[in-house]
Image (cartoon, coloured by chain):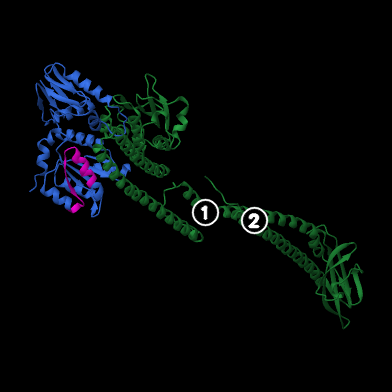
Chain colours: A green, B blue
Amino acid sequence: MSMRPARTTSLRRMMAVQLVSAAAVLATVLIFLFQSFSRQIAEESQDNVLLASATSILESISARDGALSVDIPYAALSMLGSISDDRVFYRVDFGQETLTGYGDLPRATDLPNASGFTTVEYKGADTRIVSATRNLSVDGQSRSVIVSVGQTQEGLAERLRELFWTAILIGAGFFAFSAGLALWASSRVFRPLSALATSVSRRGPNDLRPFLKPAPEEMLPLVAALNGFTERLSRSLSRSEDFITEAAHRVRTPLATVRTQAEVLFRRIERDENRHAMREMIRAVDESSRAAGQLLDQAMVTLRTDALDRSDVDLAECLRDVVERFRAVADLRDIDLRMDLEPEIHIRADPILIQNAVTNLLDNAIKYAPMETEVSVSMHRDDKRIAITISDQGRGFDEDSEADLFARFVRGAASSGTVGSGLGLTIANEVFTAHGGAVELTNNLEGPGACVIAYLPA
Amino acid sequence: MHVWGNKAQQCFNGGKFADMRFLLIEDNEQLAKAIRDRLGLDGHIVDHAPNLDEAKHYINTSEFDLVLLDIMLPDGDGRTLLSYVRAAKMDTPVIVLTARSEVSDRVSILDLGADDYLTKPFDFSELEARVRAVLRRRGGGTATVQTIGDIKFNRMAGTLILAGGPVELRNKELRLFEVFADNPNMIFSKPKLVDRLFSYEEDVSENAIEVYVARLRKHLAGSRVSITTLRGSGYRLSVS
């Protein structure tokens, strides 16, 4: 029943993988950006403090009586110390002469492309140095005073390490969030597709209406193609229904002519062997028309059971119609047709199918029952199920042949000499199975004869 | 002014399946001819209309005991005639002959007022049985009772009324007695009686006739009516 094409990569997985990789790339970029930005901010703030410190030292230098006096304010160095435990160095130069501080501390102004700031290794540690300059005149000579303040960068490095972990944490969070979003989105994007698939598979094989539910733009070509396909299918189905009706008409009318002419001839024939031949001919016509009728029934039943058209059925009334229809035929063979139908039983079923199935069962029963016997149709319900029993007083079924009887064209042992195509039980079985029931073949408990019980869920 | 319905109300030919007037509406000429010949064998008169138009003409100008109507006709659907007949309040029985076998089709045929239907090809003994059933349903209690010697025969009810009271006849017994009652003093051979009583589906030996004759004789015992055996030629109903 379920044929599947080979599976290629899942679109949903493809989309999810792409979105998650994009999220990973974005998260990495985010980490780098955050890190460089935070390094820049940290460095700038160190630079600002260093510059402020250098400037305040510079401003504390004064020339008095031809001599320079340097009074380094406490705040100038404490503002640096308050930031971290880094070591602080300073140096004050007046021209070529170092007035105070570490004479070997590099000055930022000495270095090429000097901008006032530099980072050098000093006393075994990376040190950020700022140099600020101011001109002072002493004894009529104007010379520049250079104040350099340096601070090791261990505190900065420490802070940057902390910030690095923060960046990683933020990046990971971003990744987790956007990956989740990606998975959700990819499953959501394909939801209309699986909705369409569900609505297609939920339909019966004969439900060939076009799909008109709104669909996303990208799916419209698929839906249109599907609708085109179902339309072609429905055209071909209705063609085959027309064909069946037409075929029935074309076959049955000439058969009727042959049969009628044969009856007329039969009456006129005197010789025994000719009468025998004519009788055989009439039977052959009956057999072929029965076969045609049952094949058409079978085709109709198969078509209808695929998509059960259930309505409210008064079961007793439905069965009574069928039984009354057989009264004339039963009378012909002096068969007493008995009915015992429990009233007020309503079920949801396809009445046309139920009538067809019971017609086939009853037709069998009346055909195989000996003349002047009784055929009874009863219908009763218990808490679990409804049983429709059709019993006759014929030969009954052979014990081991019951399963075979359902197979198409197999006829029971009782049938030799009686016209029939053997499809009747197959049809009935198909109908009751489709309604959630079953057909059971047994023999009567008391007395001879077959007993067919069709069950329906109560 | 048509008088179609009136005859039907009178007595339906007394429930006798002979000398009835049929209107056959069927477009297939060969089938129509065959049906005419076959019904003619039973002593019926058949008028044939090949289309709806002629059928309406017949219906409006003549009286019929029964209409046999085909569904697929060249100038329309036979069901429209059914509606036409029922709308005009004519109550002549109509039996539909259909080439289709779908149950849904049959249901709509009955809903439109057909008395019964048969699927082509059909067995004439089944047609006869259905015609009888339809006439019995329509005729109700207005059946005529035939008097033979000192007994009465009610074919509608299927009873013989003897001095000792009514006797119910089974279907085959009734058919057999009917054959004799329709043609008193006529001799019927066993093969002829088998033809009249049994359909072709059944393998019946001519001895079966002896069984039914014996039963009828048992029913008739004590009356002046009897079935006599004429060695070598058959049976005859006689009144002493």
Lateral position of residue A284 relative to residue A190, left or right: left
Q: Position of residue A268 (x, y in %)?
A: 23, 38
N-term-proximal mark, 2 vs 1: 2
Residue B51 colored magenta? yes
Q: Secondary structure at mark 1?
A: helix
Across and down, in percent, residue B173 comes to 21, 25
The disc at residue A17 is 2
Query: The disc labelled 2 sits on which kind of residue?
Result: Val
Which residue is tagged 1? Answer: A193
Tell me where residue A30 sits by quadrant.
bottom right
Q: CA distance from mark 2 to mark 1?
A: 19 Å
Contact? badges 2 and 1 (CB < 8 Å): no
Indicate yes or no whether the magenta region holds residue A277: no
Q: In the current view of this chain or complex, which residue is farthest to the left?
A: B1
Is residue A212 visible to the viewer in this orientation of the structure?
no
State whether residue A85 appears in this view.
Answer: yes
Quarter of the image where one finds residue A255: top left
**Mark 1 residue crowding within 10 angstroms, few (<14) / some (14–19) / many (20+):** some
Helix, strand or loop under label 2: helix
Residue at 20% in and 49% down: B81
Callout in the foreground (2, 1)? 1
Residue B102, how many percent across, how many down?
33, 43
**What's drawn in magenta, residue-wise?**
B33-53
Taking depth in this image into account, of A167 and B1 the one nearest to the observer is: B1
User: Residue A236's mark?
Assistant: none
**Chain hosting mark 2:** A
Which residue is painted at 90% across and 61% down in the image?
Answer: A124
- Chain letter, disc 1 residue: A
Q: Amino acid at mark 1?
A: Leu
Q: Is residue A193 left or right of residue A17?
A: left
Mark 2 closeness class: few <14, some 14–19, many ≥20 residues within 10 Å: some
